[in-house]
Amino acid sequence: RRGRPPEPRTLIIPPIDNIPRALRGRSVEVTFYIDVTGVVTDIRVSPPISDRGFARKFDEAMRSYRFRPARDSEDRIVAGVFPVTLTFPER
C-alpha cells in the first residue's frame, strides 16, 4: 500500500485583485507544507514575487487554505507537501 499526499479542501486560486503587471499571464509554483491537522505551516513560491505588497497578500491567501492531511502507507496521518502551479489571469 502507498500513502497519499495532502488534499486541498477547496480549489486553490491566486488572489486576482491588483495583480502586478509583471505577473499577469505568468505562472508560479507554490509548495505548501502542511501539518497533521491540515494547516499550512509554510509556503515556497518559485519564482518569488518581487512586488512586496502583492507578495504579502499572496502569502496570506495561500496560508489560509486548509487541507486533508497526508497519510503514510499504514494510513497514519502525517505532515506532507503539496505543490501546485498557479497562473495569474492576463487582465
Image: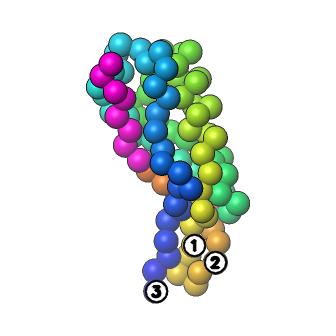
Give the Cα distance between marks 2 and 1: 5 Å
Instruction: Please tell me whether residue 70 belongs to the stretch shown in magenta.
Output: no
Residue 74, given in percent of the width and then of the height, sits at 58, 84
x 52%, y 60%: residue: 7
Q: Is residue 2 above or below residue 62?
A: below
Q: Amino acid at mark 2?
A: Arg
Q: Amino acid at mark 3?
A: Arg
x 35%, y 13%: residue: 21
Instruction: Please tell me whether residue 87 belongs to the stretch shown in magenta.
Output: yes
Residue tagged 2 = 76
Disc 2 and disc 1 in contact, CB within 8 angstroms: yes
Looking at the rendering, in which quadrant would you find the C terminus?
top left
Among numbered discs 2 and 1, the one appearing first in the sequence: 1
Disc 3 and disc 1 in contact, CB within 8 angstroms: no
Q: Amino acid at mark 1?
A: Arg
Residue tagged 3 = 1
Q: Please report the bounds of the magenta region as a residue range.
A: 84-91
Q: Is residue 90 above or below residue 76?
A: above
Residue tagged 1 = 71
x 58%, y 34%: residue: 61
Q: Is residue 50 visible?
A: no
State how many labels appear: 3
Among numbered discs 2 and 3, the one appearing first in the sequence: 3
Q: Residues within 10 Å of mark 1 (few under 14, many from 20)?
A: some
Residue 85, given in percent of the width and then of the height, sits at 37, 43
Give the Cα distance between marks 3 and 1: 11 Å
Q: Nearer the viewer, residue 62 or 78?
A: 62
Q: Is residue 18 above or below residue 9?
A: above
Residue at disc 1, secondary structure = strand
Residue 29, given in percent of the width and then of the height, sits at 39, 40
